[in-house]
Image: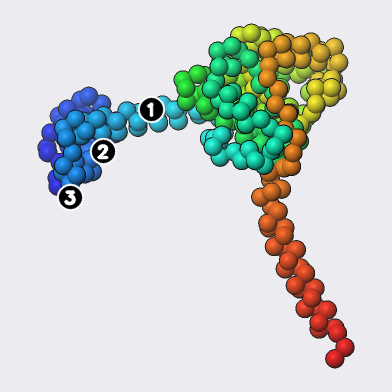
Amino acid sequence: MTAPPTAFTTDSASPLVQLGLRHLGEALPVLLDEARQQQVSYETFLFRALSVEAQARHGRLLQRRSQAAHLPPRKSLDAFDFSFQPSLSERQVRELAGLSFVQTTTNIVLLGPPGVGKSHLAVALAWAALEAGYSAYFTTLTALAEDLEEAGRKNTLRQRLRFYARPQVLVIDEIGYTRLGARQAPLLFDLINTRYENGSLILTSNKSFTEWGPLLGDEVLASALLDRLLHHAEILTINGPSYRMKERLPLLQDQRKEETSHEKEVKQQHQPR
Ligand code: ADP
Ligand code: MG
């Protein structure tokens, strides 16, 4: 490999260091080599060099923002097998991924049994929003309810409600796995009320809306909450098989095959000769 010119070393006198172009500094020896071999034009070289720095910065910024947003590892719509869930409209999901729901502060509610991809879609939409420059935050209902209850005890509820009101997209995952306590349910209502027409919510639940009353332990509160939540909302109901079972199905079938061939062997061994 050809050594980079001294002006491009990583010591403090290098213009790259002075301009803070750290990623370009690291990639430069390879870029220069490629440029010499492919005999690229000055324009192409400059474009490639600046793109390396720009992409690396964008990636790092996105990583920092996704950590602050508490987002689980990235999920994408491209990795989602729509043919596995015919009850779900691919067109509707792709339209949501266009993100106009963020601007219109429309809520998204994903309903369905476990394993049908509710969290996958919620995370994919939140990542898409983050990548497009919107702010987002991800939490589960259990974590949120405990956090708000603790804030109530510590007299910091107003700050916490403000914290959850701020992101343009707030994901509340797994509504329905635990019942809310008597103190928690009104706090959830406060939060939904604070965000009403101010920011989008993406909720996932394995319970139909009629079951939210018992879930919150208060029918009147649940109905007031649903009233605000569903005023501007898109509801996606996924009625289908669990994808987790699909992944396990070949394993189960292999296991079954092994068992039957073992059964055959045993039978043969016990057959009278
Ligand atoms: P839910 O939240 O509805 O219980 P998840 O979104 O957690 O289900 O899905 C379970 C797992 O299966 C995840 O790893 C998810 O990425 C994957 N998955 C679910 N549905 C699909 C699908 N249609 N195509 C590809 N992967 C899927
Ligand atoms: Mg889930």
Which percent across, then down, holds residue 135?
A: 52, 19
Amino acid type, residue under disc 3 in the picture: Met
Answer yes or no: is residue 142 visible.
no
Query: On residue 1, which mark appears?
Result: 3
Q: Is residue 164 above or below residue 255?
A: above
Q: Does the Cβ of the disc 1 residue fall within 8 Å of ligand 1?
A: no
Q: Is residue 167 left or right of residue 65?
A: right
Q: Does the Cβ of the disc 3 residue fall within 8 Å of ligand 1?
A: no
Res 39 quadrant in image? top left
Tell me what residue is drawn at x 20 percent, y 25 percent: 18
Amino acid type, residue under disc 1 in the picture: His
Dot 3: what SS?
loop
| Near-viewer residue (219 or 206) | 206
Which percent across, then down, holds residue 138?
A: 60, 26
Q: Is residue 270 left or right of residue 21?
A: right
Dot 2: what SS?
helix
Query: On residue 131, which mark appears?
Result: none
Q: Which residue is mark 1?
A: 58
